[in-house]
Image (spheres, helix red, strand yellow):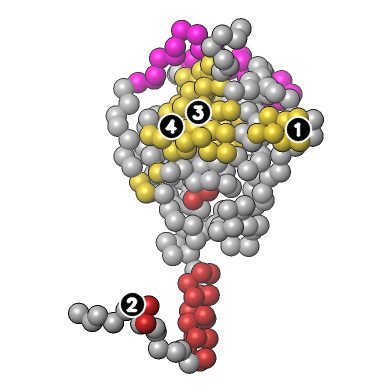
Amino acid sequence: MSDRPLAAVRPAPRSPRRATLALALAAVAFATPPQGAPGYTDTPLLPDGKWCVHDSRRPQPRVVAPGAMHGPAAAPADALVLFDGTDLSRFTGGDGPARWKVGDGYAEVNGTGDIETLDAFGDCQLHLEWCAPVPAAGESQGRGNSGIYLMQRYEVQVLDCFDNKTYPDGQAAALYGQKPPLVNACRPPGEWQSYDILFEAPRFDGEKLVKPARVTVLHNGVVVHHAQEYIGPTSHRDVGVYSPHPDRLPFRLQDHGNPVRYRNIWIRPLGQYDAP
Ligand code: MG
């Protein structure tokens, strides 16, 4: 072993030609998705300064098999049940009643457009279950795509990410275009999956953002976001910017053209324990 001080060990000087070659190789490595994920490299840079929106080069969340789920999770006594599997009367299709297909205990996206709650919510605990279509059809963002737009603008992505590679910030449970889930806890298509979402609405003082929206999400009982802030409203190929909005707004379920199913949707508005 050498007793030469480490600081004295210097790499041999590089020739300009070798340096150019190294730079060229690095550029190729940067431009090529290392894991072959679909996505983009020509979109705006996210505030983290590392990745652009829908960056295909971003590391893929590791896969975690969730524990077994034994039927729908029963709602707590004080929850507001928004969909119990029988009717969508608490939702609107925008210009009238929600027209998604209601089957035996589920509602299914059918190309009639997004639906949203008639009630408005701010801070809340939201539970819902969703199921990706079988057989799995399409790939990347085209497979079992839907989503939950909290306050009509902050999406938690729904996507069949079981053996379906896509850009990490567009995965199931991603804050779409902003933050990939900590892990990929997807079940196979055709199996019911749960989201438990603890959402904190953003706070505004007049035109000024005082506190960004924040969310904790459990996907099939696995934490995939922990008090994660939204950069702004979620967007495709863009970085959303906050603009003031009411304290409470409906949430929306996305019709992305894939027959994703939902069931067991309930919500608990959150406040201080001693507030009405
Ligand atoms: Mg979506």
Q: What residue type is labelled 2?
A: Leu
Reading the image, the residue beneath label 1 is 244
Magenta-span inclusion, residue 95: yes
Residue 161 is at least partly visible in this image: yes
Other-residue count near label 1 (Cα within 10 Å), few / some / many at <14 / 14–19 / ≥20: few
CA–CA distance in space, label 4 to label 2: 47 Å
Of residues 46 and 84, which is closer to you in this image?
Answer: 46
Residue in the image at 68% along x and 22% along y = 248
- Residues in magenta? 71-99
As helix, strand or loop, the secondary structure at mark 1 comes to loop
Please identify the quarter of the rendering in which residue 175 is found.
top right
Res 6 label: 2
As helix, strand or loop, the secondary structure at mark 4 comes to strand
Location of residue 158 in the rendering, given as x and y in whole percent from the top left corner: 51, 37
Other-residue count near label 4 (Cα within 10 Å), few / some / many at <14 / 14–19 / ≥20: some
Q: Quadrant of the N terminus?
A: bottom left
Looking at the image, tell me whether mark 3 or mark 1 is earlier in sequence order: 3
Looking at the image, tell me whether mark 3 or mark 2 is earlier in sequence order: 2
As helix, strand or loop, the secondary structure at mark 3 comes to strand
In the image: residue 4, left or right of residue 19: left
Looking at the image, tell me whether mark 4 or mark 3 is earlier in sequence order: 3
Is the C-beta separation of discs 4 and 3 under 8 Å? yes
